[in-house]
Amino acid sequence: MTAVQIEIQLVAALVAVTCSLPGVFLILRRMAMMSDAISHAILLGIVLAFFVTRDISSPFLIIAAALTGLLTVSMVELLNRTGLVKEDAAIGLVFPLLFSLGVILISRFAGKVHLDTDAVLLGEIAFAPFNRLELFGYDLGPKALTVMAVILLANLSFIIFFYKELKLATFDAGLAAVLGFSPGIIHYGLMTLVSVTAVGAFDAVGSILVVALMIGPPATAYLFCDRLSSMLTASSLIGVIVAITGYWLAHFLDASISGCMATMAGIIFGLTFLFSPGRGLVAMSLRRVRQRLEFAQTMLVVHLYHHEGLPEEEKENSVEHLHEHLRWRRSFSERVVWFAKERELVERQNGFIILTERGRAAAQKAITG
């Protein structure tokens, strides 16, 4: 593995962890599309700051982009609070407006500057190692690595120092307000982090991958985590996995690195969505089948218990009669009997079903509660 390959993967992993931390709170607050809005709308702030500074590497571009992100959030909430427009519609109105203004300004006044819309949208992380940061003649590595390390430190500091406030404002904003935690300030602080993270990351990987890394890993972690701390840790680890596997997929296919990373984010989410132990689609389907069988098993033992010792017992205790009495298909009846027999609740004797002591106790428990 060459030094360039290692640096590309380091930058990608750092971007993934930095994006996934604020992304966890966007997922929990059901504001995932806000990351898409901010990552596009900040283009306007970058262009306006460039017109003032005339320097594409000026730190004022990051400040202006962060302010534009806050402007986006404020405009969305202002529209939403009127009650005339829902939040998703407000996002759909605000971010195309700001993004398109940025695109018009670039095409009209900055056509000869390396600030084109393709670079903003798609990015090219393969070029990140060639943009070096030098200090006093020493090479400090890719500039993106330093920028994202500083932003990651800021994100971690904010989350650690305001963990309790963030947790309370995320899950119960009303209670946070009653307890004097100012959820509005926490909200705008979080949105500032999202804006700064987006503008710092999209210079290296493009806004599409910023959205994929900010939403994909946290949404995946949400499927199997029950605690906020574990979700933050899991989403960071998933982000690193997405970055590394995406890079090697691109290397194998000789394709776009950003595209393959975004694809891996989708694949990992899809696999987790299907096979997550607790909340995956397969686990939920199996749980529903089992619950249906358990409910039918209870109906069976209660049915047998009600007719136990009566003259019609023989008739009621045949599998064929279950179709008539309980409206079950024969295949389902056989399955329920097999399920109950495996748990030693019933036995088959001479073609009839009879309760065991365990089944009789289960029927009494179901009747009396």
Image (cartoon, rainbow, N blue to C red):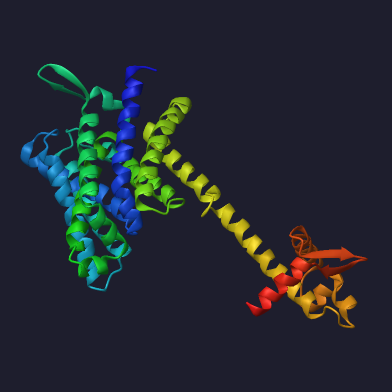
Whether residue 223 is visible: yes
The answer to which quarter of the image holds residue 109 is: top left
Residue 120 is left or right of residue 325, and the answer is: left
Residue furthest to the bottom = 311
Q: Residue at x 20, y 67 (%)?
A: 179
Whether residue 123 is visible: no
Q: Locate residue 105, reporting x and y percent.
A: 16, 45
Q: Locate residue 206, reporting x and y percent.
A: 29, 39
Residue furthest to the left = 52
Q: Residue at x 29, y 38 (%)?
A: 118
Location of the N terminus by quadrant is top left
Q: Residue at x 21, y 44 (%)?
A: 157
Q: Nearer the viewer, residue 166 or 285?
A: 166
Q: Locate residue 250, reporting x and y percent.
A: 43, 29
Q: Residue at x 42, y 33 (%)?
A: 246
Residue 338 is left or right of residue 37, and the answer is: right
* Number of residue marks: 0
Location of the C terminus by quadrant is bottom right
Residue furthest to the right = 350
| Looking at the image, residue 150 lies above or below residue 269 | above
Q: Nearer the viewer, residue 363 or 93?
A: 363
Residue 133 is left or right of residue 282, and the answer is: left
Q: Locate residue 93, reporting x and y percent.
A: 27, 61
Q: Nearer the viewer, residue 203 or 215?
A: 215
